[in-house]
Amino acid sequence: MTIPAKLPSERALEIITVGLSPELAIHHCDNADRSKAHLFEVGGPGGRQFALVVGDMYAAKGPKPSQQTRILLEKCKVPEMAGVSPCDDDYSGSRIKQADSRIAPPNQSSCLVADESALRGLLRWYAQYRGASDDYDAASLGSLERTRLEKAAQDAGFDLSPTVERDWLVFRSTAFPGTVGVASEIAGYRVVVSDAGLARRVATEFTAVAADASPPWAVYLNNIQDYPTLHRLFGRIAAVSRVLAGEGLRAFEESRRHPPDTTEATRLVVQRVGQDIFRASLLAYWGQRCAVSGLAVPGLLRASHIKPWADCASDAERLDVFNGLLLAPHLDALFDGGWVTFLDSGQIRISDALDAASRTRLGLTGAEAIIGLTERHQAYLAWHREHCFDRKK
Protein backbone atom coordinates (compact mmCIF):
# COMPACT_ATOMS: atom_id res chain seq x y z
CA MET A 1 0.00 0.00 0.00
CA THR A 2 1.43 3.37 -1.00
CA ILE A 3 0.31 6.93 -0.51
CA PRO A 4 1.81 9.83 -2.53
CA ALA A 5 2.31 12.24 0.38
CA LYS A 6 2.37 12.15 4.16
CA LEU A 7 0.53 14.39 6.60
CA PRO A 8 2.19 14.36 10.06
CA SER A 9 -0.20 13.34 12.83
CA GLU A 10 0.60 16.49 14.83
CA ARG A 11 -0.70 18.63 11.98
CA ALA A 12 -3.73 16.37 11.55
CA LEU A 13 -4.55 16.72 15.26
CA GLU A 14 -4.45 20.51 14.92
CA ILE A 15 -6.75 20.44 11.89
CA ILE A 16 -9.26 18.22 13.68
CA THR A 17 -9.33 20.01 17.04
CA VAL A 18 -9.09 23.59 15.76
CA GLY A 19 -10.11 23.77 12.11
CA LEU A 20 -12.84 21.13 11.83
CA SER A 21 -14.15 20.95 15.40
CA PRO A 22 -16.60 23.91 15.14
CA GLU A 23 -17.73 22.95 11.65
CA LEU A 24 -18.48 19.29 12.37
CA ALA A 25 -19.22 19.56 16.12
CA ILE A 26 -16.31 17.23 16.88
CA HIS A 27 -16.13 16.05 20.50
CA HIS A 28 -12.65 15.14 21.78
CA CYS A 29 -13.11 12.14 24.05
CA ASP A 30 -9.57 12.21 25.47
CA ASN A 31 -7.31 14.37 27.55
CA ALA A 32 -4.55 16.15 25.70
CA ASP A 33 -1.84 13.78 27.04
CA ARG A 34 -3.23 10.49 25.75
CA SER A 35 -0.61 8.52 23.85
CA LYS A 36 -0.70 6.69 20.54
CA ALA A 37 -4.36 7.36 19.60
CA HIS A 38 -7.03 10.00 20.17
CA LEU A 39 -10.75 9.18 20.10
CA PHE A 40 -13.34 11.63 18.75
CA GLU A 41 -17.08 11.78 18.12
CA VAL A 42 -18.43 13.72 15.17
CA GLY A 43 -21.73 15.56 15.65
CA GLY A 44 -21.14 16.03 19.39
CA PRO A 45 -20.98 13.59 22.33
CA GLY A 46 -22.52 10.27 21.43
CA GLY A 47 -21.98 10.82 17.70
CA ARG A 48 -20.22 8.55 15.25
CA GLN A 49 -16.67 7.80 16.42
CA PHE A 50 -13.33 8.07 14.71
CA ALA A 51 -9.74 8.04 15.94
CA LEU A 52 -6.40 9.52 14.95
CA VAL A 53 -3.26 7.44 15.52
CA VAL A 54 -0.65 9.91 16.82
CA GLY A 55 2.19 7.56 17.77
CA ASP A 56 4.35 8.13 20.84
CA MET A 57 3.74 11.86 20.78
CA TYR A 58 3.63 12.13 24.58
CA ALA A 59 6.29 9.60 25.59
CA ALA A 60 8.37 10.73 28.58
CA LYS A 61 11.62 9.95 26.76
CA GLY A 62 12.20 10.38 23.05
CA PRO A 63 8.70 11.24 21.84
CA LYS A 64 8.11 9.93 18.31
CA PRO A 65 4.92 11.36 16.79
CA SER A 66 3.72 9.58 13.69
CA GLN A 67 4.86 11.15 10.43
CA GLN A 68 1.71 10.02 8.68
CA THR A 69 -2.00 10.32 9.39
CA ARG A 70 -3.99 7.16 10.00
CA ILE A 71 -7.71 7.58 10.65
CA LEU A 72 -9.85 4.85 12.17
CA LEU A 73 -13.59 4.86 11.43
CA GLU A 74 -16.57 2.83 12.54
CA LYS A 75 -17.06 0.03 10.02
CA CYS A 76 -17.92 1.56 6.62
CA LYS A 77 -16.88 1.61 3.00
CA VAL A 78 -14.04 4.13 2.80
CA PRO A 79 -14.83 6.51 -0.08
CA GLU A 80 -12.70 6.65 -3.19
CA MET A 81 -11.12 10.10 -3.08
CA ALA A 82 -7.74 11.63 -3.81
CA GLY A 83 -5.28 11.31 -0.95
CA VAL A 84 -7.17 8.57 0.93
CA SER A 85 -5.79 5.00 0.92
CA PRO A 86 -7.66 2.22 2.79
CA CYS A 87 -5.54 0.07 5.12
CA ASP A 88 -5.64 -3.69 4.83
CA ASP A 89 -4.83 -4.32 8.50
CA ASP A 90 -6.70 -3.30 11.65
CA TYR A 91 -5.30 -1.08 14.38
CA SER A 92 -5.80 -2.44 17.90
CA GLY A 93 -3.91 -0.21 20.31
CA SER A 94 -4.97 -0.12 23.95
CA ARG A 95 -6.98 3.08 23.58
CA ILE A 96 -9.09 1.52 20.84
CA LYS A 97 -9.88 -1.52 23.02
CA GLN A 98 -11.26 0.49 25.93
CA ALA A 99 -14.93 0.30 26.88
CA ASP A 100 -15.93 3.71 25.49
CA SER A 101 -14.56 2.87 22.03
CA ARG A 102 -16.85 1.59 19.28
CA ILE A 103 -14.10 1.15 16.70
CA ALA A 104 -12.21 -1.90 18.00
CA PRO A 105 -11.70 -4.64 15.39
CA PRO A 106 -13.68 -6.00 13.65
CA ASN A 107 -15.95 -2.94 13.86
CA GLN A 108 -13.30 -0.81 12.17
CA SER A 109 -12.28 0.64 8.84
CA SER A 110 -9.06 2.60 8.57
CA CYS A 111 -7.11 4.56 6.02
CA LEU A 112 -4.01 6.69 5.50
CA VAL A 113 -4.62 10.33 4.59
CA ALA A 114 -2.04 12.13 2.47
CA ASP A 115 -2.80 15.82 2.97
CA GLU A 116 -4.99 18.43 4.64
CA SER A 117 -7.53 18.58 1.81
CA ALA A 118 -8.05 14.81 1.92
CA LEU A 119 -8.46 14.85 5.73
CA ARG A 120 -11.09 17.57 5.58
CA GLY A 121 -12.93 15.82 2.74
CA LEU A 122 -12.88 12.45 4.51
CA LEU A 123 -14.24 13.76 7.81
CA ARG A 124 -16.92 15.88 6.10
CA TRP A 125 -18.02 12.76 4.26
CA TYR A 126 -17.99 10.78 7.51
CA ALA A 127 -20.14 13.40 9.26
CA GLN A 128 -22.79 12.85 6.58
CA TYR A 129 -22.39 9.06 6.24
CA ARG A 130 -25.72 7.32 6.71
CA GLY A 131 -24.83 3.63 6.67
CA ALA A 132 -24.82 0.96 4.01
CA SER A 133 -26.19 3.13 1.18
CA ASP A 134 -23.62 5.35 -0.52
CA ASP A 135 -26.24 7.12 -2.63
CA TYR A 136 -26.75 10.80 -1.81
CA ASP A 137 -30.14 12.43 -1.70
CA ALA A 138 -31.19 15.55 0.16
CA ALA A 139 -33.97 13.77 2.03
CA SER A 140 -31.42 11.65 3.90
CA LEU A 141 -29.16 14.50 5.02
CA GLY A 142 -27.93 14.06 8.57
CA SER A 143 -29.63 16.29 11.13
CA LEU A 144 -26.39 18.16 11.90
CA GLU A 145 -25.67 18.91 8.24
CA ARG A 146 -29.24 19.95 7.49
CA THR A 147 -29.28 22.27 10.51
CA ARG A 148 -26.05 23.91 9.32
CA LEU A 149 -27.39 24.43 5.80
CA GLU A 150 -30.64 25.90 7.11
CA LYS A 151 -28.75 28.30 9.38
CA ALA A 152 -26.61 29.58 6.49
CA ALA A 153 -29.74 30.20 4.42
CA GLN A 154 -31.72 31.81 7.24
CA ASP A 155 -28.84 34.13 8.16
CA ALA A 156 -28.92 35.40 4.58
CA GLY A 157 -32.69 36.01 4.58
CA PHE A 158 -34.12 32.84 3.02
CA ASP A 159 -37.07 32.82 5.40
CA LEU A 160 -39.37 30.18 3.86
CA SER A 161 -39.20 26.59 5.05
CA PRO A 162 -36.79 24.57 2.91
CA THR A 163 -38.07 21.83 0.64
CA VAL A 164 -36.41 18.70 -0.70
CA GLU A 165 -36.42 18.47 -4.49
CA ARG A 166 -34.55 15.45 -5.79
CA ASP A 167 -30.88 15.90 -4.87
CA TRP A 168 -31.32 19.44 -3.52
CA LEU A 169 -32.27 21.10 -0.27
CA VAL A 170 -34.04 24.15 -1.70
CA PHE A 171 -34.38 27.62 -0.16
CA ARG A 172 -36.62 30.58 -1.03
CA SER A 173 -37.42 33.99 0.45
CA THR A 174 -40.44 36.27 0.73
CA ALA A 175 -38.11 39.29 0.38
CA PHE A 176 -36.70 38.56 -3.07
CA PRO A 177 -37.28 36.19 -5.99
CA GLY A 178 -35.05 33.37 -7.00
CA THR A 179 -34.41 29.88 -5.70
CA VAL A 180 -31.23 28.24 -4.43
CA GLY A 181 -30.54 24.54 -3.98
CA VAL A 182 -27.65 22.97 -2.05
CA ALA A 183 -26.18 19.47 -2.04
CA SER A 184 -23.42 18.25 0.27
CA GLU A 185 -20.59 16.39 -1.39
CA ILE A 186 -17.46 14.63 -0.19
CA ALA A 187 -15.22 17.64 -0.82
CA GLY A 188 -17.62 20.48 -0.06
CA TYR A 189 -20.89 21.71 -1.54
CA ARG A 190 -22.64 22.08 -4.85
CA VAL A 191 -25.08 24.96 -5.33
CA VAL A 192 -27.68 25.47 -8.04
CA VAL A 193 -29.38 28.81 -8.74
CA SER A 194 -32.52 29.69 -10.71
CA ASP A 195 -31.21 33.07 -11.98
CA ALA A 196 -28.29 32.77 -14.42
CA GLY A 197 -27.16 36.40 -14.19
CA LEU A 198 -27.16 36.29 -10.41
CA ALA A 199 -25.23 33.02 -10.32
CA ARG A 200 -22.51 34.20 -12.69
CA ARG A 201 -22.16 37.53 -10.82
CA VAL A 202 -21.34 35.80 -7.53
CA ALA A 203 -19.32 32.99 -9.17
CA THR A 204 -16.59 35.49 -10.12
CA GLU A 205 -16.19 36.52 -6.48
CA PHE A 206 -15.96 32.99 -5.09
CA THR A 207 -13.87 31.45 -7.89
CA ALA A 208 -16.69 28.93 -8.23
CA VAL A 209 -16.97 26.88 -11.40
CA ALA A 210 -20.23 27.86 -13.14
CA ALA A 211 -21.97 25.42 -15.47
CA ASP A 212 -25.34 25.47 -17.23
CA ALA A 213 -28.08 23.52 -15.49
CA SER A 214 -31.35 21.99 -16.66
CA PRO A 215 -34.67 23.83 -15.97
CA PRO A 216 -36.00 24.89 -13.56
CA TRP A 217 -32.43 25.68 -12.59
CA ALA A 218 -30.11 27.94 -14.56
CA VAL A 219 -26.54 27.52 -13.31
CA TYR A 220 -24.58 25.09 -11.13
CA LEU A 221 -21.87 26.53 -8.86
CA ASN A 222 -19.21 23.94 -8.08
CA ASN A 223 -16.01 24.11 -6.03
CA ILE A 224 -17.66 25.50 -2.86
CA GLN A 225 -15.09 23.91 -0.61
CA ASP A 226 -16.26 24.50 2.97
CA TYR A 227 -19.09 25.69 5.16
CA PRO A 228 -17.77 29.24 5.83
CA THR A 229 -17.53 29.80 2.08
CA LEU A 230 -21.07 28.47 1.62
CA HIS A 231 -22.31 30.81 4.38
CA ARG A 232 -20.74 33.84 2.64
CA LEU A 233 -22.08 32.68 -0.72
CA PHE A 234 -25.65 32.59 0.63
CA GLY A 235 -25.19 36.15 1.92
CA ARG A 236 -23.95 37.41 -1.44
CA ILE A 237 -26.74 35.65 -3.36
CA ALA A 238 -29.33 37.27 -1.09
CA ALA A 239 -27.72 40.73 -1.29
CA VAL A 240 -27.55 40.70 -5.09
CA SER A 241 -31.07 39.24 -5.30
CA ARG A 242 -32.45 42.17 -3.29
CA VAL A 243 -30.72 44.66 -5.58
CA LEU A 244 -31.96 42.95 -8.74
CA ALA A 245 -35.49 42.85 -7.31
CA GLY A 246 -35.54 46.66 -7.15
CA GLU A 247 -35.05 47.14 -3.42
CA GLY A 248 -33.26 50.45 -4.04
CA LEU A 249 -36.06 51.89 -6.17
CA ARG A 250 -38.68 50.91 -3.59
CA ALA A 251 -36.68 52.58 -0.82
CA PHE A 252 -36.32 55.72 -2.93
CA GLU A 253 -40.04 55.89 -3.69
CA GLU A 254 -40.80 55.46 0.01
CA SER A 255 -38.47 58.35 0.88
CA ARG A 256 -40.42 60.69 -1.42
CA ARG A 257 -43.70 60.26 0.42
CA HIS A 258 -42.76 62.97 2.94
CA PRO A 259 -40.65 65.60 1.11
CA PRO A 260 -39.40 68.90 2.65
CA ASP A 261 -41.50 72.05 2.36
CA THR A 262 -39.68 73.99 -0.39
CA THR A 263 -39.17 72.97 -4.00
CA GLU A 264 -35.38 73.46 -3.97
CA ALA A 265 -35.00 71.62 -0.68
CA THR A 266 -37.08 68.81 -2.10
CA ARG A 267 -34.87 68.50 -5.16
CA LEU A 268 -31.63 68.45 -3.16
CA VAL A 269 -32.84 66.02 -0.52
CA VAL A 270 -34.41 63.68 -3.06
CA GLN A 271 -31.21 63.58 -5.10
CA ARG A 272 -29.02 63.00 -2.05
CA VAL A 273 -31.28 60.22 -0.76
CA GLY A 274 -31.40 58.64 -4.19
CA GLN A 275 -27.63 58.73 -4.58
CA ASP A 276 -27.16 57.18 -1.13
CA ILE A 277 -29.54 54.36 -2.07
CA PHE A 278 -27.81 53.95 -5.42
CA ARG A 279 -24.41 53.67 -3.72
CA ALA A 280 -25.73 51.05 -1.29
CA SER A 281 -27.09 49.05 -4.22
CA LEU A 282 -23.78 49.17 -6.07
CA LEU A 283 -21.84 48.17 -2.96
CA ALA A 284 -24.13 45.16 -2.60
CA TYR A 285 -24.04 44.22 -6.28
CA TRP A 286 -20.28 44.51 -6.77
CA GLY A 287 -19.40 42.96 -3.42
CA GLN A 288 -17.77 46.17 -2.13
CA ARG A 289 -15.02 45.92 -4.76
CA CYS A 290 -14.07 48.20 -7.63
CA ALA A 291 -15.58 46.72 -10.80
CA VAL A 292 -12.27 47.25 -12.63
CA SER A 293 -9.36 47.12 -10.20
CA GLY A 294 -10.86 44.94 -7.48
CA LEU A 295 -9.97 47.53 -4.81
CA ALA A 296 -11.83 46.42 -1.67
CA VAL A 297 -11.85 49.56 0.49
CA PRO A 298 -15.54 50.58 0.55
CA GLY A 299 -14.86 54.05 1.97
CA LEU A 300 -12.76 54.92 -1.08
CA LEU A 301 -15.09 53.55 -3.73
CA ARG A 302 -17.38 55.79 -5.81
CA ALA A 303 -20.86 54.99 -7.08
CA SER A 304 -20.50 56.13 -10.68
CA HIS A 305 -23.58 56.54 -12.88
CA ILE A 306 -23.00 55.42 -16.45
CA LYS A 307 -25.86 57.58 -17.66
CA PRO A 308 -25.84 60.59 -15.30
CA TRP A 309 -28.65 61.29 -12.84
CA ALA A 310 -29.76 64.46 -14.65
CA ASP A 311 -29.97 62.69 -18.03
CA CYS A 312 -32.09 59.78 -16.84
CA ALA A 313 -35.71 59.73 -17.98
CA SER A 314 -37.10 58.10 -14.83
CA ASP A 315 -36.32 57.13 -11.27
CA ALA A 316 -36.15 53.54 -12.45
CA GLU A 317 -33.19 54.49 -14.68
CA ARG A 318 -31.55 56.56 -11.95
CA LEU A 319 -31.75 53.71 -9.44
CA ASP A 320 -31.05 50.87 -11.90
CA VAL A 321 -28.02 49.00 -10.55
CA PHE A 322 -27.02 48.24 -14.15
CA ASN A 323 -26.69 52.00 -14.75
CA GLY A 324 -23.74 52.12 -12.38
CA LEU A 325 -20.20 51.02 -11.75
CA LEU A 326 -18.44 50.88 -8.40
CA LEU A 327 -15.06 52.46 -9.13
CA ALA A 328 -11.83 53.46 -7.44
CA PRO A 329 -11.60 57.30 -7.14
CA HIS A 330 -9.26 57.88 -10.09
CA LEU A 331 -11.30 55.62 -12.37
CA ASP A 332 -14.51 57.35 -11.30
CA ALA A 333 -13.04 60.77 -12.16
CA LEU A 334 -11.77 59.55 -15.53
CA PHE A 335 -15.07 57.86 -16.38
CA ASP A 336 -17.25 60.75 -15.20
CA GLY A 337 -15.11 63.23 -17.13
CA GLY A 338 -15.20 61.25 -20.36
CA TRP A 339 -11.48 60.44 -20.38
CA VAL A 340 -12.23 56.72 -20.45
CA THR A 341 -15.16 54.51 -21.35
CA PHE A 342 -15.74 50.78 -21.68
CA LEU A 343 -16.65 48.54 -24.59
CA ASP A 344 -19.42 45.95 -24.44
CA SER A 345 -16.71 43.38 -23.71
CA GLY A 346 -15.76 45.35 -20.61
CA GLN A 347 -12.40 46.43 -22.06
CA ILE A 348 -11.34 50.00 -21.29
CA ARG A 349 -11.02 52.61 -24.03
CA ILE A 350 -8.82 55.61 -23.26
CA SER A 351 -9.23 59.01 -24.88
CA ASP A 352 -6.42 60.10 -27.22
CA ALA A 353 -6.47 63.41 -25.36
CA LEU A 354 -4.82 61.67 -22.40
CA ASP A 355 -1.11 61.57 -23.26
CA ALA A 356 1.22 58.66 -22.54
CA ALA A 357 2.93 60.35 -19.58
CA SER A 358 -0.42 61.05 -17.92
CA ARG A 359 -1.57 57.49 -18.51
CA THR A 360 1.58 56.21 -16.82
CA ARG A 361 1.11 58.48 -13.81
CA LEU A 362 -2.49 57.28 -13.51
CA GLY A 363 -1.42 53.65 -13.78
CA LEU A 364 -3.44 53.05 -16.96
CA THR A 365 -2.10 50.31 -19.22
CA GLY A 366 -5.03 49.89 -21.60
CA ALA A 367 -5.52 46.31 -20.37
CA GLU A 368 -8.04 47.31 -17.67
CA ALA A 369 -11.51 45.79 -17.95
CA ILE A 370 -14.75 45.56 -16.01
CA ILE A 371 -14.94 42.30 -14.10
CA GLY A 372 -18.46 40.84 -14.25
CA LEU A 373 -20.07 43.02 -16.94
CA THR A 374 -23.51 41.82 -18.11
CA GLU A 375 -25.69 42.44 -21.15
CA ARG A 376 -27.92 44.71 -19.05
CA HIS A 377 -25.03 47.17 -18.67
CA GLN A 378 -24.46 47.47 -22.40
CA ALA A 379 -27.22 49.94 -23.34
CA TYR A 380 -26.00 52.36 -20.67
CA LEU A 381 -22.38 51.96 -21.76
CA ALA A 382 -23.38 52.63 -25.37
CA TRP A 383 -25.01 55.87 -24.18
CA HIS A 384 -21.82 56.81 -22.31
CA ARG A 385 -19.63 56.18 -25.37
CA GLU A 386 -21.89 58.35 -27.50
CA HIS A 387 -22.62 61.22 -25.12
CA CYS A 388 -19.75 61.34 -22.59
CA PHE A 389 -16.58 59.85 -24.00
CA ASP A 390 -14.11 62.41 -25.40
CA ARG A 391 -16.35 65.27 -24.23
CA LYS A 392 -14.34 66.34 -21.21
CA LYS A 393 -15.86 68.54 -18.54
Image: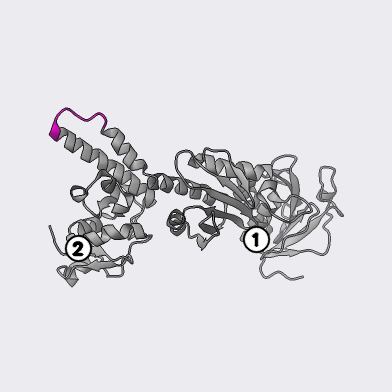
Residue 254: x and y in percent read: 31, 34
Question: In front here: 367 or 65?
Answer: 367
Q: Position of residue 330 (x, y in %)?
A: 23, 57
Find numbered disc 2 in the image and state the secondary structure of the residue it sits on: helix
Q: Nearer the viewer, residue 347 or 37?
A: 347
Q: Residue at x 53, y 39 (%)?
A: 154
Sequence-wise, which precedes: disc 2 or disc 1? 1
- Left or right of 317? Residue 64 is right
Packing grade of label 1 (10 A; few <14, some 14-19, many >=20) is some
What amino acid is at disc 1? Ala
Q: Is residue 339 visible?
A: no
Q: Residues within 10 Å of mark 2 (few under 14, many from 20)?
A: few
Marks 2/1: CA–CA distance: 54 Å
Identity of the amino acid at label 2? Glu
Which residue in the structure is indicated by mark 1? 118
Quadrant assignment for the C terminus: bottom left
Residue 193: x %, y % from top left? 51, 53
Given residues 268 and 32, the one toward you in this image is: 268
Vertical comparison of 330 with 349: above or below = above
Q: Which residues are magenta?
A: 257-264
User: Which residue is tagged 2?
Assistant: 386
Total marks placed: 2
Q: Is residue 321 above or below residue 355?
A: above
**Is 4 left or right of 200, judged from the image as shown?**
right
